[in-house]
Amino acid sequence: NAGVTQTPKFQVLKTGQSMTLQCAQDMNHNSMYWYRQDPGMGLRLIYYSASEGTTDKGEVPNGYNVSRLNKREFSLRLESAAPSQTSVYFCASSDGGGGQLPSPLHFGNGTRLTVT
Amino acid sequence: QKEVEQNSGPLSVPEGAIASLNCTYSDRGSQSFFWYRQYSGKSPELIMFIYSNGDKEDGRFTAQLNKASQYVSLLIRDSQPSDSATYLCAVGSYFSGGYNKLIFGAGTRLAVHP
């Protein structure tokens, strides 16, 4: 049982290049999330998908797009990378339903992205 | 005012002591509270969650919640050097359609010295 798997683990881009971060979960979770983590700022939500077929903006969506390909997979795309997007990106999932209380997030191992 | 506030630390405690980590939050409608541990260069790992006022114990860890004061804490008893990490507090609300809105604090760095 792999949990949440992210690829790649590391990436270096030049300003203006594009790339897609991949994320897959095998826990049959409904909800998936993309966060970025910067020193001193904690985890900030970029986009989320509450269920298959839906996506919504989080706190810092500018410069990003997402695709919920199916229940398992949720990708994050940077169309034209900027140095301000240098960060560690985490994908997470949760079962997200069945009750009225938020359930925990389960995180992937992260992608360290540097934009020069 | 940040939505979830934590002292950045470092909080330095001797091995065997009790480490006390604190978190305050601004949204009175928050419903659930999570503590994650994050080792340097690794992803956050869930330690505990608490939904109701009071204490919840799990091994060496105790989470304490006071909704009236909008305060949640994590106590680590018999601290070990392996507990040295950054501890993230997250505060959650549930929205219809299955969206869990979790807001994270910036984390408190804990250093347990032998």
Image (spheres, coloured by chain):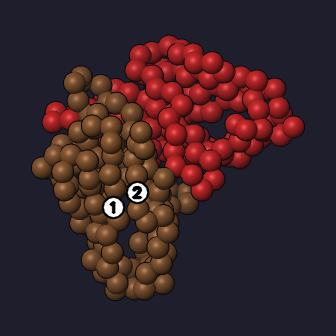
Can I make out residue B104 in this image?
yes
Dot 1 amino acid type: Gln
Q: Which mark is residue A6?
A: 2
| First in residue order: circle 1 vs circle 2 | 2
**Chain coloured red:** B
Pick whichever, A1 or B54, lies toward us. A1
Q: How many marks?
A: 2
Q: Which residue is mark 1?
A: A22
Gap between marks 1 and 2, in whole Å?
6 Å
Give the residue drawn at x 76%, y 32%.
Answer: B80
Q: In the rendered image of this protein, which colour is used for chain A?
A: brown
In the picture, the quarter occupied by the C terminus of chain B is top right
| Image position of A42 (left or right of B108) | left
* Tags 1 and 2 touching, CB below 8 Å: yes
Say which of A55 and A5 sits in front. Answer: A5
Disc 1: which chain? A
* In the image: residue A49, left or right of residue B47: left
Chain for mark 2?
Answer: A
The amino acid type, in three-letter code, at marker 2 is Gln
Please name the residue shown 43% across and 66% down the image.
A8
